[in-house]
Amino acid sequence: MLASVILGFAVALMSPMLWAVEATDSDDDLMPDAYENSYAFLDPQNPSDAALDQDGDGYSNLEEYIVGTAPDSAASKPGDVLLIDDDLPGFSALSAYTDALDQLGVTYDVITTEADDIPVELAAHREYPNIYNKIIWFGHTWMGPTQEAETALAATLDAGKCLILNSQDYFYHREAKTAFMDEYLGVDSIVGDIAIDKGSDTVTGAGRFSELGPYSLTYPYGDYSDAVTPDSTAFTGFIGDNGGTSIFKDSGVYRTGFLTFQLEAITLVDRAEAIEALLDYCDTGHLPVSDFDGDGTPDVDDPDDDNDGLPDTYEESHAFLDPFNASDATLDQDGDSLTNLQEYLAGTDPTKADTDNDGLPDSYEASHAFLNPLKTSDAALDQDNDELTNLQEYLAGSDPTKKDTDNDGLSDKYEFDNQLDPADGVCPTWVCGGGSWRHAISLIK
């Protein structure tokens, strides 16, 4: 039987021939008879061969036909990324993206929208969205997905894929926020042409991308970046001088990123770094692998990733601490009876038993409110006015808040001066003579 099959190829890795034919497809499997007859393992009378994977490269015979790769060679298969070039003829920024991907060692295929229309390849791709997991759509001037293209992209995203849409004129081109922007990109509001001040032209990563930038932008054409604000389902990824310049959404099914500044406006080194981060986002998403303690705050925004009370910056500054290991907060690195968390809260050095070197251990000072483990001078003070300094009380084992620690009738000072134990509660026989402590006191007097 005949089936109308519109096929188009403008894939970078194959012949540039673009063709659209009315072809005979006897088994109605979307592969023309002429194509199937060119391979011995395909049968124009058997529709089941479309779903088979002859070369074992993970792509079906039909998918290889749609993309234009050889179905009998595992080395010839769809790239890791699909690039959709939506630029005007003569203004293509394709090399900016391919150069960055080449530098990263990422394989890709390229199709063109021919400056506004949905590519016929994408129309075919809409029927088989599993071919590419990651799509980068770029276009700078008056470009952006049409309503028809949005429909195709929505079907691809619903199949669990990732789209990075890089277009400073998508909003301008559509003249208003579209349902696709709202539902699939997570756009709450958008203001045209103001996101980046012409005076400085920089963008800086935020949230999940906070380690990126700032990037200086040099446009080979006009800078018309929009300011975008995410709704509650999305988050800002880059910020310009006058607002957010990107929105990212991880729905749990699909992932999207909408950049209103052009990646081709930054240097190749910065562009490769940014694209690598974008593709990593496509692979890993926003929260599932980047929220270690599961508190709903991404690790890049969470000051305490393991939720142990020790800030990440504090743990990172001490080699024996790990910001992703909560148990280290309860350990005692310097053996002074204070845990690492207690040392942090007290402001003491977790590697020194006596932070201020005054002879009083940190744990001793921390247990007495009138002592400060960071203040050396308090060791020489006399809290209970018994003529023993706080340091002498510590060395004697007496209570620095009581003049007679063991209540034996002999002052701590007397026992200290006579090499007695002010904390044992025993009156020595040479003083008490077997009598009462009152008798001993009378002798002392």
Image (cartoon, rainbow, N blue to C red):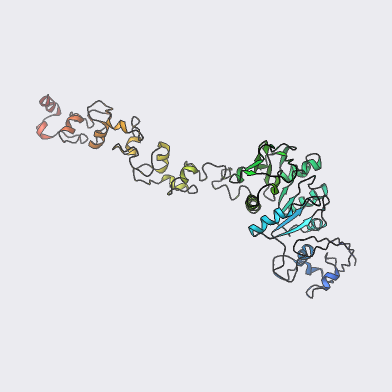
Up-down relation of residue 281 to residue 356 (above or below):
below
Given residues 233 and 120, the one toward you in this image is: 120
Quarter of the view holding residue 424: top left
From the top left corner, tell me how far across and down residue 180 is, in percent.
Answer: 77, 45
Q: What is the quadrant of the C terminus in the image?
A: top left
User: Residue 256: in sight, yes or no?
Assistant: no
User: Residue 171: in sight, yes or no?
Assistant: yes
Q: In the picture provided, is 314 more to the left or to the right than 262?
A: left
Quarter of the view holding residue 301: top right
Up-down relation of residue 13 to residue 112 (above or below):
below
Please tell me how many numbered marks the rendered image carries. Answer: 0
- Report the residue that reaches farthest toward the bottom: 40
Q: Residue at x 90, y 63 (%)?
A: 22
Up-down relation of residue 218 to residue 406 (above or below):
below
Given residues 50 and 311, the one toward you in this image is: 311
Q: Residue at x 67, y 59 (%)?
A: 102
From the top left corner, tell me how far across and down residue 265 is, in percent.
Answer: 69, 47
From the top left corner, tell me how far across and down residue 373 is, in percent.
Answer: 35, 35
Quarter of the view holding residue 57: bottom right
Given residues 442 and 106, the one toward you in this image is: 106
Given residues 284 and 409, the one toward you in this image is: 284
